[in-house]
Image (cartoon, grey):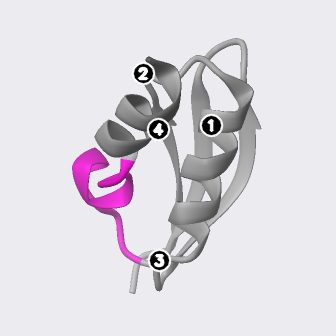
């Protein structure tokens, strides 16, 4: 176990999209979204074990397709 806070950049621009992504991250075991910087498109995520960006936000492409376009 190596808990860290990861700064995750996102392609999502709309606040609703970022909120949905933040919630989906928090529902993933071992992760919790701590903060979202909407203008900078950054999420701060607490993780028990460091992970690759794609492992933390696997739903981002789907949210982008559903809401952003």
Q: Which residue is mark 3?
A: 28
N-terminal-most mark, 3 or 4: 4
Q: Secondary structure at mark 1?
A: helix
Q: Residue at the far top: name it.
A: 39
Q: Residue 11's mark?
A: 2
Up the image or down, 58 lies above or below 36; here it is below
N-terminal-most mark, 3 or 1: 1
Report the number of discs: 4
Residue 60: % across, % down:
38, 42
Q: Which residue is mark 1?
A: 18
Callouts 3 and 4 close, C-beta under 8 Å: no
Mark 3 and mark 1: Cα distance apart in space: 16 Å
Q: Nearer the viewer, mark 1 or mark 4?
A: 1
Q: Secondary structure at mark 3?
A: loop
Choose between 27 and 9: the one closer to the eye.
Answer: 27
Q: Quadrant of the N terminus?
A: bottom left
Choose between 36 and 49: the one closer to the eye.
Answer: 36
Q: Which residue is mark 4?
A: 8
N-terminal-most mark, 1 or 2: 2
Mark 3 and mark 4: Cα distance apart in space: 15 Å
**Residue 31 is a magenta residue:** no
Q: Secondary structure at mark 2?
A: loop
Callouts 1 and 2 close, C-beta under 8 Å: no
């Amino acid at each position: 176990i190596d808990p860290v806070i990861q700064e995750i950049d996102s392609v999502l621009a709309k606040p609703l999209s970022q909120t949905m992504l933040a919630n989906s991250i928090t529902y993933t075991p071992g992760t919790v979204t701590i903060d979202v910087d909407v203008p900078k498109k950054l999420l701060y995520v607490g993780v028990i074990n460091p992970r690759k960006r794609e492992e933390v936000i696997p739903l981002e492409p789907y949210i982008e397709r559903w809401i952003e376009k």
